[in-house]
Image: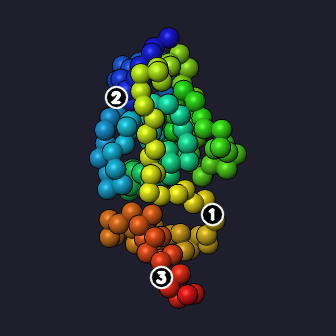
Amino acid sequence: MFVYTKEKELHKFLVDNFDKHFDFSYINSEVVTPAGRIDILGEDENNVYVVEIKRDEVNEFTIMQLVSYLPHIKKMYPNKNVIGIATAPKVDKKLSLFELPDGVLVKLLKGVMCDESKITKRNHLRSRKMLSNAVKNELYDKLKELSDETKVPMSKLLDEAIEDLLKKRG
């Protein structure tokens, strides 16, 4: 059993033992995209894999983060399928594995354990609330395109749109 406290320790362990945890080839780590830094990039004959590692658990925030990377990797590898993999020793009980976005998988890590007694929990979204809803495909595509063009995160564009809607509706 590999025991760690920091995500970077888990990351190094996974890279050093890549073949024991993944059934595709390692390409690189810490790949920088306009959406952020990808933990691990891998590939096989037909697919490119974007791996997002979490120290403690996969949650909705993890999935949102992972999804934001996929279009950028698709541009880099236009002839391959792009698959996102969120990985950690546990999954948040509130996350529905049946409602994951297309092209996104969750992989539980076996043989590793986060020593939570030595870490303090942080709230990733202190000033924000998760919003899960469905919008028309064409609206989502236009929002994503605007985000990519302006380099403004989709969450910030949604803030602006909601503020405008609230002003309009009084």
Q: Is residue 170 at least partly visible in the picture? A: yes
Q: Quadrant of residue 134?
A: bottom right
Whole-angstrom CA distance, mark 3 to mark 2, is 40 Å
x, y percent for residue 158: 47, 70
Dot 3 crowding, Cα within 10 Å, few <14, some 14–19, many 20+: few
Amino acid on which the number 1 mark rests in the picture: Asn
State the residue in front, 137 or 91. Answer: 91
Q: Which residue is mark 1?
A: 133
Q: Nearer the viewer, residue 8 or 21?
A: 8
At label 3, the amino acid type is Asp
The alpha-carbon separation of the residues under discs 2 and 1 comes to 32 Å
Of the numbered discs 2 and 1, the one sitting upstream in the chain is 2
At a point 62% along the width and 48% down the height, the residue shown is 100
Q: Residues within 10 Å of mark 2 (few under 14, many from 20)?
A: some
> For mark 3, what is the residue?
164
- In the image, residue 2 above or below residue 26: above
Contact between labelled residues 3 and 1, with CB atoms less than 8 Å apart: no
Return the x and y of residue 50 as percentages of the image width and height: 44, 41
Reading the image, the residue beneath label 2 is: 8
Q: Residue at x 46, y 70 (%)?
A: 159
Earlier sequence position, callout 3 versus callout 2: 2
- Residue 31: name its quadrant: top left
Question: Which residue appears at 34% of the width and 70% of the height?
Answer: 149
Camera-nearest residue between 104 and 126? 126
Amino acid type at circle 2 is Lys
For mark 3, give the secondary structure: helix
In the picture provided, is 133 more to the left or to the right than 70? right
